[in-house]
């Protein structure tokens, strides 16, 4: 459905990209920490659940960052570009079971 | 609140630990993939959002795995051990804003 | 922050309004059903939890309906109207801890 | 899967039932409020989304209440009763896509 031509100029702005990268790197480190916990014999379930929840929270933040930038740069300008239906369908697909 | 003595024998069973580790490793790989996307100039917001959502889904699976094992091995036996209140409080804390 | 003047023409379109109403009425009926369950001595927790989850799912649907219409009619046209920042801030507030 | 005989003594405790009822009644009132909003010509999408989100939050609270009571009264005692697998399967089904 999305045409390559249409999407070519719909990039993530550099500042958001940088911030998302920074946060995702830290999330990756967090997951490595959980992996280390799971290599120990004595890892306690609830501690693992807490850490997973913290990672989910961090990923939510990254998602919100990217979503906000997408709304501002690509959704709010859709009428101008003339691709409202495509942009809205596509976004609803991602937001659906969030 | 949780006493060390009480928790010392409440470990994640080896099979679940192994499976959680396997899944988390793959999640880590997935995040590295998103990081690579974010190093490109032309990453499209919605693709990033989709990947983040997929990682969230994978983390949910890991969480469910650990939760199930925790319910079976530690919550269902709480009355026997005599630490019902502690175990329930602690679990609710994790489940709350899931 | 939202100015009354700006918002006066940002209404929910009649078709979505009608559909949201229809679904919410049914959700209300569903909640009345749970209330009846809770008046019985013998209501089983898991049945109540299942019903609550079903209501949550139905409310998600209503939310998605309204969100889609909002994206199409008000967010995608924000650049034209010149209120991008306001519209995006406001929407992020609602989407945040969804 | 759940046998009637097994479930007959697994009821929601009266205090939780009362509290859940009280909160659900208020949630029902809240939904009636949204319905009234939706009968007006000028309902604004974001206001509707905010109200739906508030109702979801209130339903989460009811769910947590019932879940906590279920964990304490029925899950923590499962080993004693000898129905651990059934109780855990059943609960995971409800918690899954929460």
Image (cartoon, coloured by chain):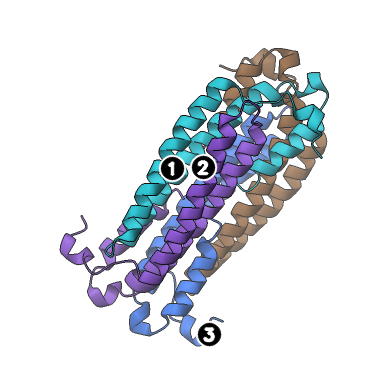
Chain colours: A brown, B blue, C cyan, D purple
Q: Eyeballing the image, is D62 above or below B44?
A: below
**Quadrant assignment, res D53:** top right
Per the model, the C-alpha gap separating discs 2 and 3 is 47 Å
Query: In what element is the residue under mark 3?
Result: loop
For the residues marked 3 and 1, what is the alpha-carbon distance in whole angstroms?
45 Å
Check whether the beta carbons of the residues at disc 2 and disc 3 lie within 8 A of each other.
no
**Is C67 positioned to the left or the right of D79 in the image?**
right
Q: Which residue is mark 1?
A: C28
Judged by depth in the image, the label closer to the viewer, 3 or 1, is 1
- State the residue position of label 2: D32
Question: Where does the N terminus of chain D fall, quadrant-wise?
Answer: bottom left
Which residue: 35% across, 70% down? D13
Tell me if residue B13 can be seen.
no
Quadrant for residue A75, please give it: top right
Q: Position of residue D75 (x, y in %)?
A: 34, 69
Residue C80 is left or right of residue C39, and the answer is right
* Chain that bears disc 3: B
Is label 1 on the same chain as label 2? no
Pick the residue in front: B66 or B89: B89
Q: Are marks 3 and 1 in contact (CB under 8 Å)?
A: no
Q: Which mark is residue B31?
A: none
Residue pointed to by mark 3: B3
């Amino acid at each position: 459905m999305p045409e390559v031509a249409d999407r070519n100029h719909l990039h993530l702005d550099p500042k958001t990209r940088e911030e998302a990268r920074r946060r995702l790197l830290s999330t990756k480190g967090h997951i490595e920490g959980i992996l280390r916990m799971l290599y120990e014999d004595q890892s306690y379930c609830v501690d693992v659940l807490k850490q997973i929840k913290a990672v989910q929270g961090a990923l939510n933040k990254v998602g919100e960052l990217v979503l906000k930038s997408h709304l501002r740069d690509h959704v709010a300008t859709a009428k101008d570009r003339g691709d409202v239906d495509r942009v809205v369908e596509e976004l609803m697909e991602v937001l659906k079971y969030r």
